[in-house]
Amino acid sequence: MQGPDGKFYYFKRSQYKEATELKPGKDYKYEFWSEIIAYELGTSLGFNMLRYDIAVDGEIMGCISESMINSENQELVEGVKYLQAFSPKYEPANKEHQNWYTFDLIERALKSANLEENLNNILEIIVFDSLIGNGDRHQENWAVITKQKLITDVIEEIEQSKEVKVGKILKWLFKIIREAVNSKRKKDSSAPLPKSYYVIDKSFAPIYDSGSSLGRELVDEKVDLILTSEELLLQYISRGTSEIHWDSKKPTHFELIRNLLKSRYGKEMIAIIERVIKSFDVARLEEIVKTIDKDVPESHKRYKIPDNRKLLIIKMINLRFEKLRELIHERV
């Protein structure tokens, strides 16, 4: 939908599954809060996050986010497009192909698309997901933003950059290119310029769609039960798995991180985790969770997060943080 500021926004409500003859219904009432808490927490820890805020659509409360792209000259290319370009036989909807979705496939696909520098963004996502227990980072839940830029605009950026020295040869080349673009425009100002006059700029999208986390599937009775025992809480956390596979198997979040720490990406993983450790503040975490719903209007107070669920969220994140810290100590 388009806002009064002319920008486009997306409203997201919590998932609700109708009951069937075989399965009971499921109401993930607090799922949208997981999205908002994830944004606040991730931002405080230095992750590049898409912003989510509470919003109301009639009787329904959910969260809202601004579109990540300008549809006129940008495109959001989801990860699945790169995976299928590299491995055309890969079909995410095919259950037999689910274990194809591995870190190795992501690595090879991004390298093939000359996006190797974005592998660090994948590592960032993996670390962040381990903190919030996100088990749904599928191939459409990360993306690259492509932007079409006129070559003369790129030249202007280079000339204004303090990091690039433009010598005589480059200045001469830039002049030739500008003259060619201007000449083409003068011949037919209404006609679009050829594709060869543009370059494609690519940047990794902010972390988005993190709602399948923070115990959003737990019914109130289960929340109360887990809070009675730290052992139950640890068991719950230990069962959480990553959607990104390793050697065709679905690892837990911390098994995946342990494998990456032992891989060629160990140095990068350590840098990300050490940044998280340095930035993590228990008081800030508690403030985020305890006050996240303070602006909920009286008419929608049923959407407020119960105190016991807030307590569980804080405990879960703290324990997951401690597990991350332990992995670094193992490495040392």
Image (spheres, helix red, strand yellow):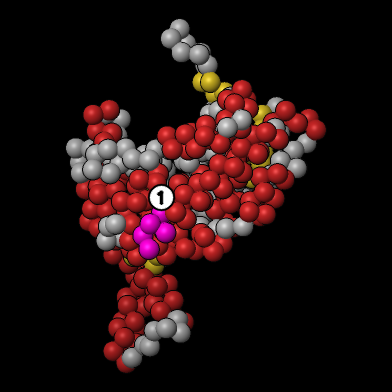
* Main SS category, magenta section: helix
Magenta-drawn segment: 327-332
Disc 1 residue type? Ile
In the rendered image, residue 70, in percent from the top left (x then y), is placed at 50, 53
Residue positioned 25% across, 47% down in the render: 105
Regarding residue 66, the answer to whether it shows in the image is no
Residue positioned 26% across, 29% down in the render: 94
In the rendered image, residue 7, in percent from the top left (x then y), is placed at 59, 50
Would you say 37 lies left or right of 116 here?
right
In the rendered image, residue 16, in percent from the top left (x then y), is placed at 54, 24
Q: Quadrant of the N terminus?
A: top right
Could you say which is closer to the camera, residue 183 or residue 202? 202
Res 186 → quadrant:
bottom left
Kindly give the residue lying farthest to the top in the view shown. Answer: 21
| Whether residue 48 is situated above or below residue 235 in the rendered picture | below
Q: Residues within 10 Å of mark 1 (few under 14, many from 20)?
A: many
Residue positioned 42% across, 59% down in the render: 329
Regarding residue 319, the answer to whether it shows in the image is yes
Residue positioned 27% across, 53% down in the render: 107
Find disc 1 in the rendering and name its residue.
126
Res 252 → quadrant:
top left
Q: Secondary structure at mark 1?
A: helix
Would you say 246 lies left or right of 182 here?
left
Could you say which is closer to the camera, residue 185 or residue 90? 90
In the rendered image, residue 158, in percent from the top left (x then y), is placed at 41, 79
Could you say which is closer to the camera, residue 166 or residue 319? 319
